[in-house]
């Protein structure tokens, strides 16, 4: 089971020098969202069987995150990380230690995984509450699903959870890069 292509969580993995692309199913959606918040490229395939995940990962050159210990021999060339059930904090900490993100924290849509685009308050008129337009420290937009993101108390709570899980502070954006 613990070959160089499939490993039990946290065993035999070294830090990656380039960013990593993951793929999973909805059983690990909570972990996938947390990884996206940290800037990781994580695709979720809803309702997929393990073999479908492995086939998609082969095509897209991604690492499969799964709770299944199975790894059919015909997919021996596909990298798989078996993630234990339960609290996503330890899993998140180990994945972050082993793999580099695709971007900075809060740079990907946590729902559909698309890289976010910085936008101005003018562009967000009619799309976000007026109080957000007046007070937001920065606005980002997902061109794939149309969601808007801004730094507010919800981001502070997410940041606190992520920092607690990782045991270290997350980098903050330079205020000179923020939208007006």
Image: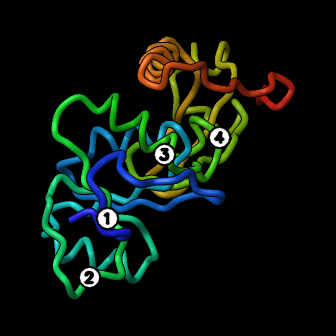
- Measure the alpha-carbon separation of dots 3 and 1: 24 Å
Kindly indicate whether the residue at mark 4 contacts the one at mark 3 (C-beta within 8 angstroms).
Answer: no
Find residue 158 and report its image quarter. top left
Label 3 Cα crowd, 10 Å radius (few <14 / some 14-19 / many 20+): many
Q: Is 153 or 174 nearer to us in this picture?
A: 174
User: Which badge, 3 or 1, is on the more N-terminal residue?
Assistant: 1
In whole angstroms, how far apart are the C-alphas of marks 2 and 4?
32 Å
Looking at the image, is mark 1 or mark 4 nearer the viewer?
A: 1
Q: Which element type, helix, strand or loop, lies under badge 4?
A: loop
Mark toward the viewer: 3 or 1: 1
In three-dimensional space, the C-alpha distance between marks 2 and 3, rounded to whole angstroms, equals 29 Å
Residue 152 point in image, percent of width and height: 54, 16
Which marked residue is nearer to the observer: mark 2 or mark 3? 2
Whether the residues at callouts 1 and 2 have beta carbons within 8 Å, the answer is yes
Q: Secondary structure at mark 3?
A: loop
138 displayed left or right of 127? right
Per the image, the residue denoted by label 1 is 80
Quadrant of image for the C terminus: top right
Q: Name which residue lies at 64% across and 47% down.
A: 103
SS state under label 1: strand
Label ID, residue 104: 4
The image quadrant that residue 57 belongs to is bottom left
For mark 2, what is the residue?
75
Q: State the CA–CA distance, disc 3 to disc 4.
A: 12 Å
* Image side of residue 43 versus residue 123, left or right: left
**Looking at the image, is mark 3 or mark 4 nearer the viewer?**
4
- The dot on residue 109 is 3
How crowded pointer 2 is (Cα within 10 Å; few <14, some 14-19, many 20+) is rated as: some
């Amino acid at each position: 089971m613990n070959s160089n292509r499939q490993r039990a969580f946290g065993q035999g993995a070294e830090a990656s020098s380039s960013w990593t692309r993951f793929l999973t199913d909805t059983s690990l959606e909570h972990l996938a969202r947390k990884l996206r918040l940290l800037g990781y490229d994580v695709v979720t395939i809803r309702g997929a069987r393990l073999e479908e995940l492995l086939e998609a990962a082969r095509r897209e050159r991604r690492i499969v995150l799964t709770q299944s210990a199975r790894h059919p021999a015909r997919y021996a060339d596909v990298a798989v990380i078996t993630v234990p059930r339960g609290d996503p904090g330890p899993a998140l900490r180990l994945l972050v230690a082993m793999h580099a993100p695709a971007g900075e924290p809060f740079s990907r849509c946590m729902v559909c995984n698309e890289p976010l685009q910085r936008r101005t308050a003018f562009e967000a008129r009619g799309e976000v509450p007026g109080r957000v337009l007046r007070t937001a420290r920065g606005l980002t937009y997902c061109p794939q699903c149309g969601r808007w993101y801004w730094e507010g108390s919800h981001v502070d709570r997410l940041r606190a959870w992520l920092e607690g899980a990782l045991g270290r502070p997350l980098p903050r954006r330079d205020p000179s890069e923020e939208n007006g």
